[in-house]
């Protein structure tokens, strides 16, 4: 077997620092590309349908409209998610005029697609991030591929990521945070950097 294709994970007993050796780019990167394409294809398939308000789009679309119009309201959630929805709507040409009264209301000429596309894009990043997280934890592309495929084939997650909801935004930031922690933990100098930082502070 080519020495460049597989590298092992070793632990230094004296320093307590875990040295994580990655796989060579070709196999793991190819699988990551496959996962990314599959995730984008399944999430963006008919993302504009149905062309009416669905489920909790009533709440989050409405609050996004309020943020666009700078209308005061009491927000029961942390505002970042709905502010991002409002920003995506604003940048895509939505003017915040749609009422979002009840599920089933037709969008008509309202430019709602930008907000759905934004949520769907973040939802599409969940499977690739899961792949990278498992790869960092196990150094096994096959395990990472299998775990990310489970997310891609999960109909519940697929449905949540195709509408104007907070769920894909929340899941995206959770996955990004987890990946950042795992990546930091596997960094060779992470323990040394943390020790030096704690001494200075």
Image (tube, rainbow, N blue to C red):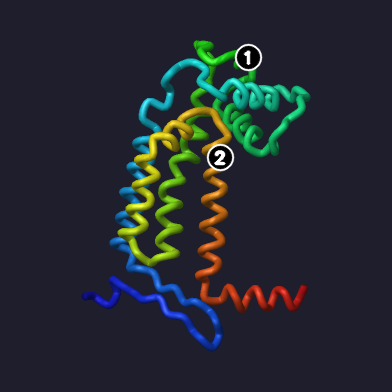
Residue appearing at x 31%, y 54% in the figure? 31
Mark 1 or mark 2, which is nearer the start of the sequence?
1
Q: Secondary structure at mark 1?
A: loop
Quick one: which residue is furthest to the bottom in this view? Answer: 14
Q: Position of residue 173 (x, y in %)?
A: 57, 47
Seen at 61% across and 78% down, the residue is 192
Residue 120 picture location, percent across and down: 47, 35
Which residue has dot 2 on it?
169
Q: Are marks 2 and 1 in contact (CB under 8 Å)?
A: no
Label number found at residue 134? none
The residue that appears at 30% across and 59% down in the rendered structure is 142
Q: Quadrant of residue 49?
A: top left
Q: Position of residue 20 (x, y in %)?
A: 44, 73
What is the distance, in whole Å, between disc 2 and disc 1 at their CAs? 22 Å
Front position in the image: 95 or 197 = 197
Label 2: few (<14), some (14–19) or many (≥20) C-alpha neighbours in 10 Å: many
Q: Is residue 98 visible?
A: no
Q: Locate the C terminus and report the quarter of the image it occupies.
A: bottom right
Q: Nearer the viewer, residue 80 or 140?
A: 140
Q: Quadrant of the N terminus?
A: bottom left
Task: Tell me residue 126's x, y (percent).
Answer: 46, 46
Asked if residue 159 is positioned above or below residue 11 in the image, the reply reads above
Secondary structure found at label 2 = helix
164 is higher (above) or lower (below) than 124: above
Question: Residue beneath label 1, please?
Answer: 99
């Amino acid at each position: 077997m080519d020495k460049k294709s597989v590298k092992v994970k070793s632990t230094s007993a004296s320093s307590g620092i875990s040295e994580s050796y990655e796989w060579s780019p070709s196999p793991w990167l190819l699988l990551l590309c496959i996962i990314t394409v599959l995730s984008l294809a399944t999430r963006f398939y008919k993302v504009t349908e149905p062309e009416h308000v669905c489920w909790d789009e009533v709440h989050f679309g409405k609050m996004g409209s309020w943020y666009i119009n700078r209308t005061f309201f009491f927000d029961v959630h942390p505002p970042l998610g709905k502010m991002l929805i409002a920003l995506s709507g604003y940048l895509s040409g939505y003017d915040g005029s749609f009422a979002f009264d009840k599920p089933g209301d037709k969008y008509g000429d309202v430019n709602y697609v930008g907000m759905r596309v934004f949520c769907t894009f973040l939802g599409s990043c969940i499977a690739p991030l899961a792949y990278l997280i498992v790869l960092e934890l196990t150094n096994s592309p096959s395990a990472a591929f299998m775990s990310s495929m489970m997310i891609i084939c999960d109909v519940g997650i697929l449905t949540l990521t195709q509408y104007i909801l907070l769920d894909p935004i929340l899941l995206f930031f959770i996955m990004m945070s987890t990946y950042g922690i795992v990546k930091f933990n596997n960094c060779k100098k992470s323990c040394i950097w943390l020790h030096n930082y704690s001494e200075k502070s």
